[in-house]
Image: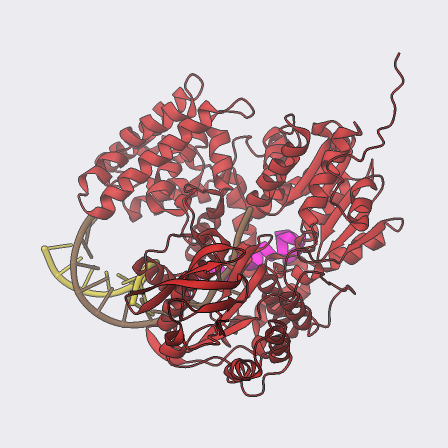
Chain colours: A red, B brown, C yellow
DNA sequence: GGGGACGGCCTTTTT
DNA sequence: GGCCGTCCCC
């Protein structure tokens, strides 16, 4: 037997880590909490840690459970682990809380009274069901708003309060009465009942039912406790009570639980996230190890400073000092425009100029906003200037009507009692089954406590000849496809259903552009089902499995284009990402902070953390913008600049902290005093009004530069002007830099100084 | 039961 | 400005 000699050389995944990071990676045993500031290499640590476990044979892949919040984060992590350890990472239980526990529930749902092919209700399904319940008990939809009801139900569930506990709690009852929703708990009870009867779980159920499984079935929880030797939770500050309790239960045996998070980046309180979980963790695991990662590797000094200044306004926070040894970098820029339309045009121009001047790619840019509907103006402006872009979020492929329609057919094939799928497609395409009939079906189902499919099977008992026949045809349609489940794959059934349901025909007959696109979308969905079937070496290729997986796919996951393009998204969606240049737009009161969040201090602090997240996405340059007027409800309204701008250090009249850093910055470049003064003044005025003068900075009059001049550029250093190009009001210059070679720069934007030619 | 016209309402963020 | 729901008439 050869003696294994411990390698002296450090493992590759450890090199390039700082001492704290290394500690976080190699301290694998026992509970630990890593408080990781923005840009401190959190993902790197997490992936290195998992790689470390695998390489050191401390655990097999399927003994590791790693939970994230987005599919994107999960995919990236898997990718990076694979890069270090090679193949064999597929067995790691790595995914979002929802997707991992959905898989677990697929095996165990029967114990809970659900079919293993349970449907998953998305927000629309849930709302639709709630709406029916409200109608059914004769309440006013305007008082009992389905979206508000659902939010309240969700909130209760995430705090592990079921409908019965809720109804029995006088505090909640009082609250409801105060909110003029005295009969809320009645809706909650019915909602829960109907979901169960339909064999459907909503998003929250995926967690709540898992929780129930683990806490009520000891034998089962023991099995999983033994299995998961090492447990990781990413973005721990965003966990809610159920999630925390699930993780705690699973970690009970091995106790190797490692959570990574940053309280300053907690932005999901609205869906039940509780920063207190960080405190709970330290309390529940008194022998935990705490590691703080405070060095920011991502951003320039200016950006880190601004971020620290912002977060200091929050009272609730863990002590942490984020610092960086990166250069000062470009000053933070604030742009003001007259209107929201102008804002988007200006930023489109600005991006083009920056891209050219700093030789960047489109993918180095991101435009971030508070609300999805702000993307509209930017899409238009970018399209007009032929700037490629992609939007993350908004209406995703899987939220399109035609897609949801076909999926609803398939859901019904797999789960006959899925009432929301049924409601969606029973009369689309038209088959003469109207509201009267549908109501009749549902009220019989409710009265006799009989599931949907049973009622449908006895349609002739309570419906007249033609209608009963129509229902019978529908039942046959679904049933025929169900018979294929055993022998045929998901694609074959979907393809059959698209045709047999008449959906394809209906869309095909619509010769409008939209109709054509919808038709193509269906084809695209069929293609993706085919792919799912073809690449099923590591998953169950059944239709049921496909449907469940698809229900958890959100917009951001579908990246069709690899083309170089700028990214547009909400700040929420941007969490965990980084871009060289970030444009944070719509910095206005009532928009950001949102008017909905001005009510309480806690809410405002969450908005501020959101602002913190946005600012810390930027690596090199951050630009903020606000407009003086904006269209709201179809009307042009005057708006005020966001309070966050001031908190960041920006001042409209007497520029303070930021102006100071700008002064330092320009003095470094060794500009002559006159220029420095001028640029300082330009910034003291701050944002500039008229579009013509809206430029980043021009230390020299653009018209002064001539061929043959020797010039100095902030980044590229000294060079010689070879050529001037006039094109559509933009003056460009081709300059040969000593160190960087030939570059084409826009004179309106380039920070050029003419040097005396000697 | 279906389709068209009108009026009200809204806008937060996501798995 | 746009979506959704309701009302009214065929």
Would you place residue A587 above or below residue A464 in this image? below
Q: Residue at x 40, y 27 (%)?
A: A530
Most extreme residue toward the front, as rendered?
A: A758
Residue bounds of the magenta highlight:
A139-166
Q: Position of residue A183 (x, y in %)?
A: 54, 62
Q: Is residue A117 left or right of residue A95?
A: left
Give percent across and percent down for residue A627. Answer: 43, 76
What residue is rendered at 46% in x and 32% in y?
A415
- Residue A91 vs A631, above or below: the answer is above
Task: Indicate the quadrant where residue A173 lies.
Answer: bottom right
Q: Overall secondary structure of the magenta stretch?
A: helix
Q: Position of residue A449 (x, y in %)?
A: 49, 40
Instruction: Say whether residue A556 is magenta.
Output: no
Task: Please name whichever residue, A578 or A129, is drawn nearer the observer in this view of the structure.
Answer: A578
> Along the line of sight, which residue is nearer the eye, A697 or A690?
A697
Q: Does residue A270 show up?
A: yes
Quarter of the image for residue A619 reads bottom right
The answer to whether one can see residue A392 in this image is no
Q: Residue A474 is drawn in which quadrant?
A: top left
Pick whichever, A18 or A662, lies toward us. Answer: A662
Q: Is residue A172 above or below residue A627?
A: above
What residue is rendered at 48% in x and 79% in y?
Answer: A687
Q: Is residue A156 highlighted in magenta?
A: yes
- Above or below residue A212? Residue A625 is below
Measured as percent of width and height from the top left, residue A2 is found at 88, 14
**Is A26 left, or right, of A209 in this rendering?**
right
User: Which quadrant: the N terminus of chain A?
Assistant: top right
Of A519 and A34, which appears nearest the observer? A34
A387 left or right, relative to A106: left
């Amino acid at each position: 037997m050869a003696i294994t000699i411990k390698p002296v050389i450090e493992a590759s995944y450890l090199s390039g880590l700082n001492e704290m990071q290394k500690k976080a990676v190699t301290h694998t045993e026992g509970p630990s909490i890593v408080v990781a500031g923005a840009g401190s290499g959190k993902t790197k640590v997490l992936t290195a840690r998992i790689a470390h476990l695998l390489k050191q044979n401390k655990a097999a892949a399927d003994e590791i459970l790693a939970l994230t919040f987005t599919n994107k984060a999960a995919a990236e992590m898997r990718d990076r682990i694979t890069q270090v350890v090679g193949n064999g990472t597929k067995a790691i239980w790595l995914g979002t809380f929802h997707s991992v526990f959905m898989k677990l529930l697929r095996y165990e749902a029967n114990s809970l009274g659900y079919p293993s092919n349970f449907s998953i209700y998305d927000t629309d399904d849930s709302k639709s069901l709630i709406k029916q319940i409200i109608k059914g008990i004769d309440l006013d939809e305007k008082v009992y708003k389905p979206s508000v009801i659902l939010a309240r139900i969700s909130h209760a569930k995430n705090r592990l309060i079921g409908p019965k506990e809720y109804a029995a709690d006088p505090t909640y009852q009082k609250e409801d009465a105060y909110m003029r929703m005295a009969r809320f708990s009645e809706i909650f009870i019915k909602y829960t009942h109907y979901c169960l009867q339909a064999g459907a779980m909503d998003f929250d159920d995926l967690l709540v039912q898992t929780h129930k499984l683990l806490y009520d079935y000891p034998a089962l929880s023991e099995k999983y406790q033994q299995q998961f030797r090492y447990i990781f939770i990413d973005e721990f500050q965003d966990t809610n009570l159920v999630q925390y309790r699930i993780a705690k239960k699973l970690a009970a045996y091995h106790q190797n639980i490692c959570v990574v998070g940053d309280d300053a980046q907690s932005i999901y309180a609205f869906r039940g996230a509780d920063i207190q979980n960080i405190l709970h963790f330290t309390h529940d695991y008194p022998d935990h190890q705490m590691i703080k990662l405070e060095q920011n590797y991502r951003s320039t000094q200016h950006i880190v400073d601004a971020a620290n200044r912002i977060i200091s306004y929050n009272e609730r926070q863990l002590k942490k000092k984020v610092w960086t040894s990166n250069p000062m970098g470009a000053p933070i820029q604030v742009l003001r425009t007259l209107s929201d339309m102008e804002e988007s045009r200006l930023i489109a121009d600005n991006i083009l100029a920056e891209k050219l001047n700093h030789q960047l790619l489109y993918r180095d840019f991101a435009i971030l906003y508070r609300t999805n509907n702000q993307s509209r103006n930017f899409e238009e402006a970018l399209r007009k200037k032929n700037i490629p872009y992609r939007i993350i979020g908004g209406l995703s492929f899987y939220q399109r009507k035609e897609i949801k329609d076909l999926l609803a057919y398939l859901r019904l094939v797999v789960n006959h009692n899925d009432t929301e799928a049924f409601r969606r497609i029973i009369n689309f395409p038209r088959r003469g089954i109207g509201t009267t009939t549908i109501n009749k079906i549902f009220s019989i189902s409710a009265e006799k406590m009989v599931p949907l499919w049973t009622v449908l099977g006895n349609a002739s008992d309570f419906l007249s000849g033609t209608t009963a026949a129509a229902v019978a045809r529908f039942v046959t349609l679904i049933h025929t496809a169900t018979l294929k489940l055993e022998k045929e794959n998901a694609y074959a059934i979907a393809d059959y259903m698209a045709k047999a349901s008449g959906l394809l025909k209906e869309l095909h007959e619509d010769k409008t552009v939209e109709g054509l696109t919808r038709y193509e979308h269906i084809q695209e969905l069929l293609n993706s089902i085919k792919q799912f079937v073809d690449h099923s070496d590591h998953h169950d290729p059944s239709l049921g499995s496909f449907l469940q997986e698809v229900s958890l796919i959100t917009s951001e996951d579908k990246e069709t284009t690899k083309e170089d393009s700028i990214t547009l998204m909400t700040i929420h969606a941007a969490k965990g990402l980084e871009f060289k240049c970030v444009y944070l737009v719509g910095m206005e009161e009532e928009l950001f902070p949102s008017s909905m969040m001005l009510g309480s201090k806690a809410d405002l602090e969450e908005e501020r953390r959101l602002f913190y997240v946005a600012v810390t996405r930027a690596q090199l340059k951050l630009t903020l913008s606000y407009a003086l007027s904006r269209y709201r409800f179809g009307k042009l309204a005057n708006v005020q600049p966001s309070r966050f701008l001031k908190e960041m250090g920006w001042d409209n009249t007497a520029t303070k902290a930021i102006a100071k850093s700008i002064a330092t910055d320009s003095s470094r470049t060794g500009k002559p005093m006159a220029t420095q003064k001028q640029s300082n003044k330009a910034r003291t005025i701050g944002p500039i009004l008229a579009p013509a003068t809206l430029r980043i900075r021009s230390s020299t009059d653009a018209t002064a530069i001539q061929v043959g001049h020797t010039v100095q550029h902030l980044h590229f250093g000294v060079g010689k002007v070879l050529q001037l190009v006039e094109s559509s009001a933009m003056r460009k210059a081709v300059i040969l830099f000593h160190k960087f070679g030939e570059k084409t720069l826009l004179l309106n934007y380039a920070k050029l100084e003419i040097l005396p030619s000697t």
